Amino acid sequence: MAFYQFKRTQRIPTDRKILWDFISSPRNLSKITPSDMGFLIRSEVPEVMYPGMMVEYTVKPLLGISTTWVTEITHVQEGHYFVDEQRIGPYAIWHHEHHIEEVDGGMLMTDIISYAPPFGFLGRLANALIIRRKLTQIFDYREKVLKEVFG
């Protein structure tokens, strides 16, 4: 099994509380996910996340094929970071860290995704040809939306 990391940072001209309130609400995830991914939250979600919270989605990551994705919020340090990990979904491993820190002019948001595609050699090939590019497209979209939301 191959293991990869994807990291993206973005400066956002806002304060910690406003950014945290936005990114820590599971309901905002659909706003920052490209529509062609067919993202839909299937479970009840509270306004504020908490450690141990499970969220079920349907998503169409490849070729418009719908799949169930269940993530657990495993760590939360209010106003600083949270971690979600896949429990059911397309990856052998998916661990996504969301960090925010104060910088001149606002906040720096850092996403670190550690993941392993399934299927050995085929997963490595899929990462080289599709997965890495798709992650870049998703985070390019998120960057654009967050610039629209926060200026």
Image: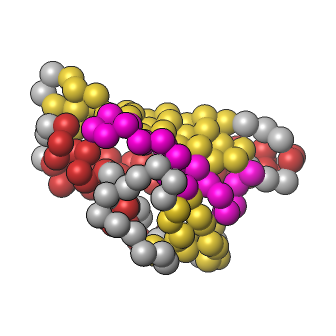
* Left or right: residue 98 compared with residue 64: left
Q: Position of residue 131 (x, y in %)?
A: 63, 51
| Coordinates of residue 29 in the picture (x, y in percent) | 37, 61
Query: Which quadrant of the view contains residue 3?
Result: top right
50, 61: nearer the viewer: 50
| In the depicted structure, whether residue 38 falls above or below residue 26 | below
Residue at 52% over, 62% down: 54
* Location of residue 73 with respect to 88 vertically, above or below: above
Relative to residue 24, is residue 135 drawn left or right? right
Picture coordinates of residue 122 (x, y %)?
Answer: 83, 52
On the rendered image, what quadrant is the N terminus found in? top right
31 falls in the magenta region: no
Nearer to us in this view, 132 or 19: 19
In front of the other: 84 or 35 = 84
Marks counted in the figure total 0
Specify whether residue 5 is in view: yes
Q: Is residue 32 visible?
A: no
Range drawn in magenta: 72-92
The answer to if 84 sits in the magenta stretch is yes
**Residue visible at 28% across and 38% down?**
79
Residue 125 is left or right of residue 67, and the answer is: right
Residue in view at x 33 percent, y 52 percent: 24
Residue sitting at x 86%, y 47%: 120
Viewer-proximal residue, 143 or 40?
A: 40
Q: Main secondary structure of the magenta part?
A: strand
